[in-house]
Image (spheres, grey):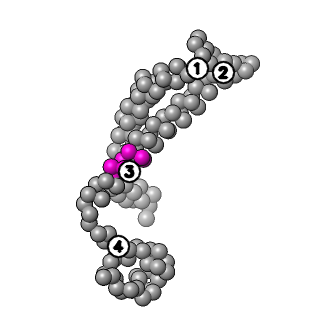
């Protein structure tokens, strides 16, 4: 298979289009998070810092260490906001929806290899161990 044919096959896969959409949506979401951090979180941080403290202008020789510290602080604040909003909040909402649905799980873990197997299975398709039937 030639390089061009391999590239066409790669681009034809759905993963490339999904990745492109994820990058665009991620960029838009990044603007929202940056605005939230700059407009809400950083003003709250300024209440903690001493007044008229220009930490962005700190230097170590010619190295502008204040800018590095500011970028690092922004990174940690943005990471915290994303973690709290996406991971914790969406995880909590997802758990509530699953609990509200009340449907039994479609799979169960195999006691030998811990791979997911259907509830009605009597033998694991991964390790072929015999499974107890579910009541």
> Of tags 4 and 2, which is closer to the observer?
4
> Are discs 1 and 2 less than 8 Å apart at CB?
no
Q: Earlier in the sequence, mark 4 or mark 1?
A: 1
Distance, label 4 to label 2, CA atoms, is 56 Å
Q: Earlier in the sequence, mark 4 or mark 2?
A: 2
Whether 51 is among the magenta residues is no
Label 1: state its secondary structure. Answer: loop
Q: Earlier in the sequence, mark 3 or mark 1?
A: 1
Residue placed under numbered mark 4 in the picture:
107
Whether 88 is among the magenta residues is yes
Using the image, tell me which numbered label, if any, was put on residue 64: 2
Q: Earlier in the sequence, mark 4 or mark 3?
A: 3
Distance, label 1 to label 2, CA atoms, is 19 Å
> Of tags 1 and 2, which is closer to the observer?
1
| Quadrant (top left/top right/bottom left/bottom right) for the C terminus | bottom left
- Left or right of 120 on screen, residue 130: right
> Are discs 4 and 3 less than 8 Å apart at CB?
no
Q: Earlier in the sequence, mark 2 or mark 3?
A: 2
Label 2: state its secondary structure. Answer: loop
> Are discs 2 and 3 less than 8 Å apart at CB?
no
Vertical relation: 34 (above or below) 7 = above
Q: x, y percentage for residue 116?
A: 40, 73
């Amino acid at each position: 298979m030639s390089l061009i044919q391999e590239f066409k096959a790669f681009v034809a896969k759905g993963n490339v289009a999904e990745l492109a959409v994820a990058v665009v949506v991620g960029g838009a979401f990044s603007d929202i998070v940056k605005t939230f951090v700059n407009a809400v979180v950083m003003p709250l941080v300024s209440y903690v810092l001493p007044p008229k403290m220009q930490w962005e202008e700190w230097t170590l020789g010619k190295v502008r260490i204040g800018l590095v510290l500011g970028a690092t602080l922004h990174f940690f604040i943005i990471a915290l906001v994303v973690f709290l909003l996406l991971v914790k909040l969406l995880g909590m909402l997802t758990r509530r929806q699953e609990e509200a649905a009340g449907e039994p799980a479609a799979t169960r873990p195999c006691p030998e290899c811990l791979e997911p197997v259907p509830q009605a299975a009597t033998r694991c398709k991964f390790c072929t161990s015999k499974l107890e039937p579910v009541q």
